[in-house]
């Protein structure tokens, strides 16, 4: 009778740690630290989103364009604070998170009837595709209807 040695298993790599670090930087970027964009966003970045102007997000195609979009969002709600409610959920190069955003409306959204100072609170989901440690592609699904309802937007 032959006995075999116990099988040796390579230690499992903790792939969540880099994703968690990247998501924390992503959160800081959306919370206003715009200097992080070039470090965590790929130069040929792609956004997939239903934009308020009816576009598909294709014009947001670089770290600088993303900073511009975040800046315009934060202009309407300067104290907007994002937090992660679920995730990160990691599957290979893909990361998913559910987030919540809260802040006070400062004005400037076309058609909004809500008074300045109105508190907005809405949620969304981000799916991020990473490449070489940076975010290369971004799908966002936010509860825009809830946000526009809180802002009392009229067509």
Image: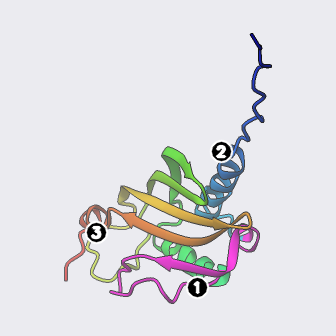
Magenta range is: 35-62
Packing grade of label 2 (10 A; few <14, some 14-19, many >=20) is some
Between circles 3 and 2, the one closer to the viewer is 2
Crowd tier of the residue under label 1, counting other residues whose Cα lies within 10 Å: few below 14, some 14–19, many 20 or above: some
Ranked by sequence position, the earlier of labels 3 and 2 is 2
Residue occupying the point 72% across, 37% down: 12
**Quadrant of the image containing the C terminus:** bottom left
Residue 44 located left or right of residue 138: right
* Depth order, front residue of 21/153: 21
Instruction: Give the SS element for disc 3.
Output: helix
Q: Distance from label 2 to label 1 (Cα)? A: 26 Å
Instruction: Say which residue label 1 marks.
Output: 61
Front label number (2 vs 1): 2
Quarter in which the N terminus is drawn: top right
Q: Closer to the N terminus: mark 1 or mark 3?
A: 1
On the image, numbered disc 2 is attached to which residue?
A: 16
């Amino acid at each position: 009778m032959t006995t075999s040695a116990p099988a040796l298993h390579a230690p499992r790599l903790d792939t969540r740690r880099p994703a968690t670090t990247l998501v924390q930087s992503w959160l800081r970027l959306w919370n206003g630290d715009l200097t992080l964009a070039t470090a965590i966003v790929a130069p040929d970045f792609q956004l997939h989103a239903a934009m308020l102007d009816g576009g598909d997000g294709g014009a947001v195609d670089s770290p600088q364009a993303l900073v511009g979009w975040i800046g315009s969002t934060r202009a309407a709600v300067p104290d907007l604070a994002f937090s992660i409610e679920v995730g990160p959920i990691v599957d290979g190069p893909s990361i998913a998170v559910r987030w919540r955003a809260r802040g006070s409306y400062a004005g400037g959204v076309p058609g909004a009837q809500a008074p300045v100072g109105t508190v907005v609170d809405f949620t969304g989901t981000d799916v991020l595709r990473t490449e070489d440690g940076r975010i290369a592609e971004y799908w966002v699904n936010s509860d825009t209807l809830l946000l526009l309802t809180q802002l009392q937007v009229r067509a």
